[in-house]
Amino acid sequence: MSVLKPPGAVIYPAAERNKPHILECLKKYVKGRQGEGSTLSLVEVGAGTGQHAAHFAPEFPHVIYQPTEFEPKLIESINAFRAHLQLPNLKDAAVLDVTQPADTWLNGSLSSNSLDYVLSINMVHISPWVCTKGLFEGASYLLKPNGYLFMYGPFAVDGNITPESNVNFDRSLRTQNAEWGLRDITRQLVPLAARLGLKLANTHDLPANNKFLAWLKHNED
């Protein structure tokens, strides 16, 4: 099957492979339309080339999908997909520095407790820890009670990395940049999330030794 590649878009083979598996996980959590005209909201942090946004947004027409990215060249790719698809629920890509306070994201247009979902794919292991911290802080501030932060990628668990290919991958990342590397779910992410009112609701094991994590924001009632 040919791969959709609009003019100006970039294609990552890994994104093509993982997007159907991530979609199946999203379908377990993203709610259906609750009433006539009702919509939900999702911000993707680090949307990369836009391949995921282009694959997910058509499946959830009642979800306003906002892709964001830090790299300008990738912004162009995301918008190339958007221009080709012409979906009313897929918004123009926005520049986002996840290390900045959440009340400044998207030029301060997002209010506290306003989002249903935040999604981050393959970001936390190839960025400094401050980015992971910013992602959780942003989700804590922006998500509605009972909203979800979704994460996908390779992770360590309780000090262990498996299989050997992920051990080698982690070593390679840290060689490239000492601030990169697989994050530990139990030792790093769960304690960080707990301080910010989020808890790990479910972990899904996916192909290529990756995981899909669903973090739930506590109901404030």
Image (tube, rainbow, N blue to C red):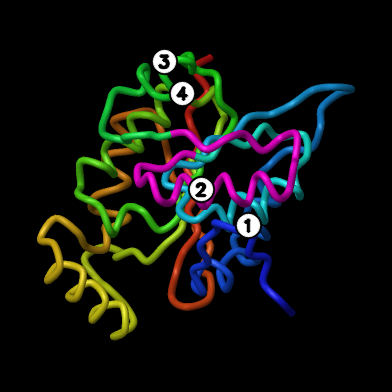
Which badge, 3 or 1, is on the more N-terminal residue? 1
User: Residue under circle 4?
Assistant: 142
74 inside magenta stretch: yes
Magenta-tinted stretch = 68-94
**Label 4 element class:** helix
Residue 26 higher or lower than 96, as above or below: below
Give the distance between the C-alpha atoms of the residues marked 3 and 4, in whole angstroms: 11 Å
> Alpha-carbon neighbours of circle 3 within 10 Å: few (<14), some, or many (≥20)?
few
Which badge, 2 or 4, is on the more N-terminal residue? 4
Q: Quadrant of residue 104?
A: top left
Residue depicted at 50% across the width and 46% down the height: 150
**Label 3 element class:** helix
User: Residue under circle 2?
Assistant: 214
Which badge, 2 or 3, is on the more N-terminal residue? 3
> Alpha-carbon neighbours of circle 1 within 10 Å: few (<14), some, or many (≥20)?
some
Q: How far across and down, in percent of the image, does residue 195 sit?
A: 28, 31
As shown in the figure, which amino acid type bears the numbered disc 3?
Gly
As shown in the figure, which amino acid type bears the numbered disc 4?
Leu
- The image's mark for residue 108 is 3
Residue depicted at 51% across the width and 52% down the height: 77
Residue lying at the far front in this picture: please name it.
7
Residue 66 higher or lower than 75, as above or below: above
Give the distance between the C-alpha atoms of the residues marked 2 and 3, in whole angstroms: 26 Å
119 inside magenta stretch: no
Q: Quadrant of residue 18?
A: bottom right
Are circles 2 and 1 on residues that touch, CB within 8 Å?
Answer: yes
User: Residue under circle 1?
Assistant: 25
Q: How far across and down, in percent of the image, does residue 142 sit?
A: 46, 23
Residue 116 falls left or right of residue 190: right
Give the distance between the C-alpha atoms of the residues marked 4 and 1, in whole angstroms: 22 Å
